[in-house]
Amino acid sequence: MGGLWGERILPHVIDAACNSKEVRPLRERACAGLTGTVLELGFGSGLNCGLYPDAVTSVLAIEPADTAWKMAAKRRASTSAPISRAGLDGQRLDLPDDSVDSVLITFTLCTIPDVDTALQEVARVLRPGGSVHIAEHGRSPDPAVARWQNRLNPAQQRVFGGCHLNRDPILLLASAGFGDVDIETGYVSQLGPMRPWMYGYSGSARLSAV
Ligand SMILES: C[S@@+](CC[C@H](N)C(=O)[O-])C[C@H]1O[C@@H](n2cnc3c(N)ncnc32)[C@H](O)[C@@H]1O
C-alpha cells in the first residue's frame, strides 16, 4: 500500500495498535525458544526487539516500509544481537537454502499478499529441524464472529495495508509443511464488538528434520 496513509501514517497506527498490553503475552510466547540466526518477516517498528532470548545471535529483518524501519532505530540499537535489513518482501527472500535457525513472524501472516509463497520461502531458508514462531490475529472458531470477519475483511484490507481478518495461521503453516504445531489460541480481549480483531494465535511449529 503506497501513498501518505500507507507509507507515512499507517506504520505509526500499527505501532500503537500492536503495542498493547493484551498483545504482549502473544509476543512473549512467540519469541520464546528463538535461537541462532533469526529471520524476522515483517519487522515493522521492532516491537519484538526487547523480547529476543539471549540465544539469538543475529536477526535478518524483512520489512518493506521505510517509515517502520526508521521508527525501529532506537529499539534496534538497544538490542544486543545485531539486526540487519535483509530484504523488503517475504515472498521473495534473497537468502540461501537452510541458512537460518529460526523464523519469527508477528502480525504479518495476516498482511503478506501471497502468504503461501512467503511460507514456502520460509521453509526453504529455514534449516531442517528449525522452527517458525508466530503471534497473529486470525479466524475465530466462533461461526458468528467468523461471519463478521468475512464481512469486514474487504474494508480491513483497504484501511490496514492489506491485513486480513480471516486467515487461519495453523492451516497456513500446515499447508506449508510445518509440523509439531504448538500454538495457543483464544480471544486476547473479550470486548464483544472487537472480537473479529481479537482472536489470537501464538506459538511455534517445526520443519521436519529430513
Ligand atoms: C501489522 S504489521 C506488524 C509489524 C510487526 N511484525 C509487529 O509485530 O509489530 C505488518 C507488517 O508486515 C509488513 N509487510 C507487508 N507486506 C510484506 C511483505 N510482502 N513482506 C514482508 N513484510 C511485509 C508491513 O510493512 C508491516 O510492517
Image (cartoon, helix red, strand yellow):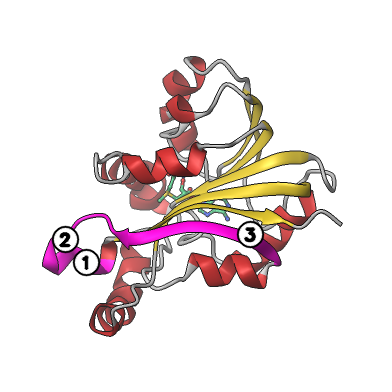
Indicate which disc residue 195 carries: 1
* Distance Cα–Cα, label 1 vs label 3: 28 Å
* Res. 114 in view: no
The segment highlighted magenta reads 177-196
Tell me where residue 60 appears, x and y as whole percent.
65, 34
Question: Which mark is on residue 180?
Answer: 3
Position of residue 114 relative to residue 141, above or below, is above
- Tally the marks: 3
Q: Image check: 45 left or right of 126?
A: left
Q: Quadrant of the N terminus?
A: bottom left
In this rendering, the answer to whether 176 lies above or below 47 is below
The residue identified by callout 2 is 190
Q: Residue at x 47, y 70 (%)?
A: 168
Residue 180 among magenta residues: yes
Q: Are marks 2 and 1 in contact (CB under 8 Å)?
A: yes
Crowdedness near tag 3: few (<14), some (14–19) or many (≥20) residues, C-alpha within 10 Å: few
Amino acid type assigned to the residue bearing label 3 in the image? Asp
